[in-house]
Image (tube, grey):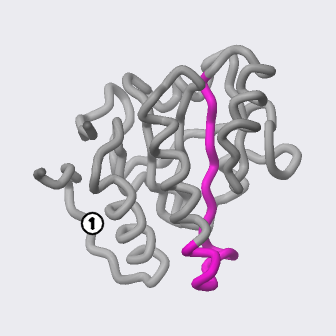
Amino acid sequence: MTSVQPALAIQAGQQVPEAAGIVLQGPAGIKLSALKGKVVVVDFWATWCGPCMESMPQIDAIRSRLLKQGYGDRFEVLSVSIDDDVDQARRFLKLHPVSYPVVIDPVGIATKNFSLWRLPATFLVRPSGEIEQIYYGFGDSFAGDIEERALALLRGRYAPSPVWAPAKR
C-alpha cells in the first residue's frame, strides 16, 4: 500500500537535500546536486524491503520509456540504498538489475537529510531542485502517477496538486 504523509522535516516545494554515497552503479562521483536542471526521481530502498523490490523495476521501466521518448538529457533516476553493507547491496543489484545510477549511503546521511520514515521513499524533483512530490510505500497507481507528473514537468505543463493518493481498488 502506498501512502503520502508529511515528512518530519522535508516537504514538497522545498529544495531537495543532497543525496550521495558510495557509487554501486553509474558515473563515478554521481550525486543529486550534479543532476540539477533535470527532472529526477530519487528512490530510497533497502535489500530487505519487499515493496522496494516491486517498485524498482517499475521505476526502471519509466526511465526506459522516457529515454526512448527523447528525454535522456532532461530526466534521470538516482537510486539510494540505505543498507549498511556495501557487498550485500551489490549482490542485490546483481539479482535485481536496474539501468540507472545507484549509490549506497551506509552511514545514513541521506536518510537523515530526507527525514525517511518508510520505504520505499521516492521523491520527484523539479529541474529547479524543488521537490515536486514525495511518495512513501508502493501501490497500484505509484508508477503511473510518477510517469505522468514527470512527463508534465518535462513538457513544462504541470500545475502541481498538493497531495498524491493511491487509486482506490
- In the rendered structure, the answer to whether residue 156 lies left or right of residue 158 reads right
Q: Residue at x 54, y 63 (%)?
A: 61
Hey, which residue is sitting farthest right in the picture?
A: 28
Question: What residue is pinned by disc 1?
Answer: 160
- In the rendered structure, the answer to whether residue 45 lies left or right of residue 166 reads right
State whether residue 105 is above or below residue 60.
Answer: above
Magenta highlight on residue 74:
yes
Q: Residues within 10 Å of mark 1 (few under 14, many from 20)?
A: some
Q: Residue at x 21, y 62 (%)?
A: 161
Label 1 SS? loop
Q: Position of residue 144 (x, y in %)?
A: 34, 64
Q: Residue at x 88, y 46 (%)?
A: 28
Q: Position of residue 55 (x, y in %)?
A: 46, 45
Q: Position of residue 70 (x, y in %)?
A: 63, 84
Label 1 is placed on what type of residue? Pro
Q: Which quadrant of the figure has residue 108?
A: top right
Q: Residue at x 25, y 37 (%)?
A: 1
Please state the extent of the stretch shown in magenta in the rendering.
65-82
State whether residue 3 is above or below residue 140.
Answer: above
Q: How many marks?
A: 1
Magenta highlight on residue 120:
no
Q: Foreground: 68 or 4?
A: 68
- In the rendered structure, the answer to whether residue 97 lies left or right of residue 161 reads right
Q: Position of residue 71 (x, y in %)?
A: 61, 79
Hey, which residue is sitting farthest left in the picture?
A: 168
State whether residue 31 is above or below residue 107.
Answer: below
Q: Which quadrant of the figure has residue 132?
A: bottom left
